[in-house]
Every structure is written in structure tokens, then in C-alpha cells.
Amino acid sequence: MEQRRGAPRAVPGRYGQKGRPLKPPPPAASRPPAHVTAEARGWEPITRRGMQRVLVTLLARHRDGDTVAASAVHEVASLHSISTHGAIEILAAMGILTDDRPDLFTSCHLGEEALSGQR
């Protein structure tokens, strides 16, 4: 019995794993900010997966126009042992972060007034 073959291709394709055609990487502008930040910082794969878990948890109920509070980022990131600063940076780059953290210099100034009033 003779094996049938399809018509030959005009241009031979390049194939990757499991015989699938290779796809060119997407341009940097179309990639999510989390991937760009992870590559720029040189994060290990375990850190990337942890950050992905944090972002998925935070954005699970997100709708267009909603924002994510920085205090919520801290709660979720600490549960997954991921840097709060990295998650806040990514959400700020996406434009969906509401920074509800107290201002450090204001709180320090109030602390000095309270201490000087106790003397």
C-alpha cells in the first residue's frame, strides 16, 4: 500500500516542539507590563509565577474603569510571599492603581509633633 502525501509547500516552514510552526515573538508594545518588568528585572521563573498569581487574584473581579488599592495589593502579595513594590509597579504601569498608602513624610512629621508635645 502506497502512502499518500499532500502537495509540497511553496516555502518550507520552520517547526518547533511537537511539529508546531514557530511563531515570532510579539512586539514589546503588545506584551503585558508584567512580562516586560519581569524580563527587565531578570526575575526567576518562580518569582514570575508568584507575581502572576498575585495579579490574577487582584484582577479576577476587575472591570474596565475599576482601580486596585495599594493596601489590597499588600494583603495579597504578602500571602504569596511576593514583593509588594513589584506588584504596585506593574499595576501603576497598567494605570489601574489607587495609591491609598499614607505619605511617609507626613506621618514622620506628625510623629515628631506628637513626640515634642509629650516633653
Image (cartoon, rainbow, N blue to C red):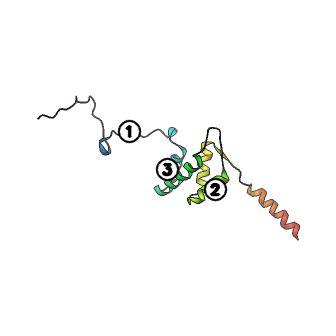
Relative placement, left or right, of 98 versus 113 is: left
| C-alpha gap between disc 2 and disc 3 | 22 Å
What residue is drawn where x is 52% and y is 55%?
Answer: 50
Q: Residue 72 placed where, x, y %?
A: 65, 53
Q: Residue 52 placed where, x, y %?
A: 52, 51
Disc 3 crowd, CA 10 A, few/some/many (<14, 14-19, 20+): few
Residue bearing mark 2: 74
| Quarter in which the N terminus is drawn | top left
N-terminal of the two: label 2 or label 3? Answer: 3
Disc 2 crowd, CA 10 A, few/some/many (<14, 14-19, 20+): some
Of helix, strand and loop, which one carries label 2? helix
Relative placement, left or right, of 97 versus 52 is: right
Q: Residue 19 placed where, x, y %?
A: 29, 42
Of helix, strand and loop, which one carries label 1? loop
Count up the numbered dots: 3
**Which amino acid, mark 3?**
Glu
Disc 1 crowd, CA 10 A, few/some/many (<14, 14-19, 20+): few
| Res 60 visible | yes
N-terminal of the two: label 1 or label 2? Answer: 1
Residue bearing mark 1: 23
Mark toward the viewer: 2 or 3: 2
Mark toward the viewer: 1 or 2: 2
| C-alpha gap between disc 1 and disc 3 | 19 Å
Mark toward the viewer: 1 or 3: 1
Of helix, strand and loop, which one carries label 3? helix
| Res 42 visible | no
Residue bearing mark 3: 39
**Which amino acid, mark 1?**
Lys
